[in-house]
Amino acid sequence: MVSREDMGSWLEGTPGGRDDGRGQRLGLPPDGPGCLATIGRRLVALVVDWLLATLVAFLFFRPDASGFFESISALPAWSQPLVFAVENVLLVSTLGFTVGHRLLGMRVRRVAEPARTVGVGRALLRTVLLCLVIPAVVWDADGRGLHDRAAGTVLVRT
């Protein structure tokens, strides 16, 4: 009979930890610089980038409201996603990282040609799919979101 302990939990990851082959098919090391970025780092970087987009949207599209939080809630619904998307496309295509990625020690790079910049086309495709949310929360066996897979990119630690 199979017990609960034999199965483990999805929170524990796969048996054996990082030696499960994640990223190895992409030629990435199992840990250290150049390895696949963890979900925790990705989420914190996303929150940082979203907060930055909110602040920039507030500065550019400041509605007439008495307080800061009232002003944030009165922003046009399209302003924050637009600023977030523009930030992602511009920064990832030129530098290879967003502000959140940089703060958490990550960068986006091409899978096939790591030395080349991501480029506007790949960054645009990646950002559009990231903004759709679903491709970003569905991962392949290597741990890459479908937005990265479609763009031919990978988010690695620096």
Image (cartoon, rainbow, N blue to C red):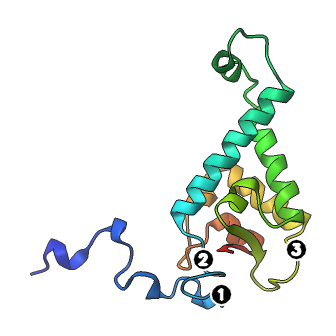
Which amino acid, mark 2?
Leu
| Marks 2/3: CA–CA distance | 18 Å
Name the residue at 14% across, 79% down.
Answer: 2
Please, is residue 54 above or below residue 68 in the view?
Answer: below
Quadrant in the rendering for residue 44: bottom right
| Picture quadrant of residue 42 | bottom right
Mark carried by residue 151:
none
Q: Nearer the viewer, residue 15 or 126?
A: 15
Q: Say which element carries label 3.
A: loop
Residue picked out by circle 3: 117
Residue where numbered disc 1 is placed: 26
Q: Residue at x 79, y 48 (%)?
A: 85
| Residue marked by disc 2 | 36
Query: In the rendered image, which quarter is residue 134 located in?
Result: bottom right
Type of amino acid at the residue the image marks with label 1:
Leu
Q: Nearer the viewer, residue 34 or 23?
A: 34
Callout 2: SS: loop
Choose mark 1 or mark 2, whichever is in front. Answer: 2
Question: Are there few (<14), some (14-19), or many (20+) residues within 10 Å of tag 1?
Answer: some
Residue at x 77%, y 63% (from the top left corner):
97
Q: Earlier in the sequence, mark 1 or mark 2?
A: 1
Considering the image in quadrants, where does the C terminus appear? bottom right
Query: Label 2 crowding class (10 Å Cα cut-off): few <14, some 14-19, many 20+?
Result: many
- The span from disc 1 to disc 3 (Cα, nearest Å) is 17 Å
Spot occupied by residue 68 in the image (x, y as percentages of width and height): 68, 19
Residue 32 sits above or below residue 101 on the image: below
Q: Secondary structure at mark 1?
A: helix
Residue 57 location, x and y as percent?
79, 32
- Indicate the amino acid at tag 3: Thr
- The answer to whether mark 1 and mark 2 are in CB contact below 8 A is yes
